[in-house]
């Protein structure tokens, strides 16, 4: 089964990309593929809403997906996201599945997935659940390509090992100043955000360095917003589906996406968010670029 996986830092435009991609009749996307472990731990999974407005438990799309997954021999449900590699237990998640740029920890996780019997069996079970889940979505939507915007590098490394999946990768990037401004609005120091962005991109580059060039494409959030038709045309060609012109503005209510609150707003106008020009003062910008400026320029940002 053909999968296009979107990897990158958070708050880089993946929900917008999922909504646009899902408009193509041969591409199916549910955005992020599972409710976050923290939400599940807090018992709020059943309250999460699909972009159609219904809770995931009551949404006809998700109920059909769960039924198809069950018929494939895998348990699933609004509180049981059996295709999610993340642990719900906080310290197990921190040690084994939470995103990290630490090379040694990533190597330890890879070794455990191959050699530690209990962990290996867990990964194999989740692999099977992913095959069932992706098959269910493709079948329900009569699509040829599943576009996964979960963004997590940990998830991607597992999907690349599943023989049933033919995985290509879109690395979605955003100007580090936009990423830092988003973090600042949420109360985080901008220099820490710059380190997160920088380490994310370095970890992704290390993980994908052996991937064939034709199976990896770097997409900039800014290009998606300012040149949507050209960027989407490249996406369709990369995915191997026929050209398609997405009606703009896109209607989020027509899609079934897990992601940020953008998906609940109905009609979405496509516009470039460069709020960092207002939210970052001169000292903020210098602090951010001192950490990540060189790598930022490698992606074409000046």
Image: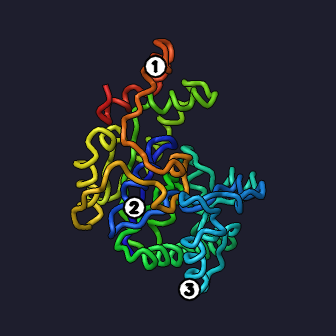
Query: How much space separates mark 1 and mark 2, taking CA atoms?
Result: 32 Å
Residue highlighted by disc 3:
72
Q: Mark 3: which secondary structure? A: loop
Quick one: which residue is furthest to the top in this view? 282
Check contact, mark 2 vs mark 3: CB within 8 A. no
Q: Where does the image place residue 49, in percent across and percent down from the top left? A: 62, 58
Counting the numbered discs, the total is 3
Tell me the residue at 71%/62% (across/down): 46
Category of crowding for the residue at label 1, using alpha-carbon neighbours closer than 10 angstroms: few (below 14), some (14–19), many (at least 20): few
Query: For the residue carrying disc 3, how many other residues have a C-alpha within 10 Å: few (<14), some (14-19), or many (20+)?
Result: some
* Drawn side of residue 279 relative to residue 166, left or right: right
Question: Distance from label 1 to label 3 (Cα)?
Answer: 51 Å
Residue 157 visible in the shown view: no
Viewer-closest of 141 and 114: 141
Residue at point 60% right, 64% down? 84
Q: Is residue 288 above or below residue 239?
A: above
Residue 105, position in %: x, y? 60, 50
Read off the residue under disc 1: 278
Q: Considering the numbered disc 1 on the image, is that residue within a helix, a strand or a loop?
A: helix
User: Of 166 and 64, which appears nearest the observer?
Assistant: 64
Contact flag, marks 1 and 3 (Cβ < 8 Å) = no
Q: Secondary structure at mark 2?
A: helix
Q: If the image is split into quadrants, where does the C terminus sit?
A: top left
Q: Quadrant of residue 160?
A: bottom left
Q: Which residue is mark 2?
A: 22
Q: Give the vertical position of 175 relative to 65 (above or below).
A: above
Mark nearer the viewer, 2 or 3:
2
Q: Nearer the viewer, mark 1 or mark 3?
A: 1
Color style of the picture? rainbow
User: Where residue 95 sits: x, y (%)?
Assistant: 68, 52
Which circle's residue, 1 or 3, is located before the other in the chain?
3
């Amino acid at each position: 089964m053909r999968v296009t996986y979107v990897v990158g830092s958070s708050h880089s435009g993946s929900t917008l990309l999922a909504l646009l991609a899902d408009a193509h009749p041969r591409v199916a996307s549910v955005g992020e593929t599972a409710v976050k472990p923290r939400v599940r731990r807090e018992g709020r999974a059943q309250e999460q809403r699909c972009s159609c407005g219904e809770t995931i438990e009551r949404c006809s799309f998700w109920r059909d997906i769960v039924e198809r997954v069950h018929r494939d021999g895998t348990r699933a449900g609004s509180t049981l996201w059996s295709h999610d590699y993340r642990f719900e237990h906080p310290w197990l998640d921190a040690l084994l599945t939470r995103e990290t740029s630490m090379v040694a920890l990533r190597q330890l996780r890879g070794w455990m997935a191959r050699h530690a019997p209990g962990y290996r069996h867990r990964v194999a079970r989740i692999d099977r659940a992913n095959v069932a889940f992706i098959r269910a979505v493709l079948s329900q939507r009569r699509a040829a390509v599943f576009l996964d915007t979960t963004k997590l590098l940990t998830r991607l490394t597992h999907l690349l090992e599943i023989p049933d999946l033919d995985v290509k990768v879109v690395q979605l990037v955003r100007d580090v100043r936009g990423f830092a401004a988003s973090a600042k609005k949420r109360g985080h120091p901008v220099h820490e955000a710059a380190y997160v962005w920088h380490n994310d991109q370095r970890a992704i580059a290390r993980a994908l360095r052996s991937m064939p060039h034709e199976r990896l494409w770097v997409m900039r959030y800014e290009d998606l917003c300012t040149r949507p038709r050209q960027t989407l045309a490249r996406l369709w060609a990369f995915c191997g589906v026929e050209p398609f012109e997405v009606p703009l503005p896109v209607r989020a209510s027509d899609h079934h996406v897990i992601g940020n609150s953008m998906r609940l707003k109905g009609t979405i106008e496509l516009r470039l968010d460069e709020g960092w020009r207002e939210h970052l003062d001169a000292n903020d910008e210098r602090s951010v670029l001192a950490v990540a400026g060189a790598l930022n320029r490698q992606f074409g940002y000046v």
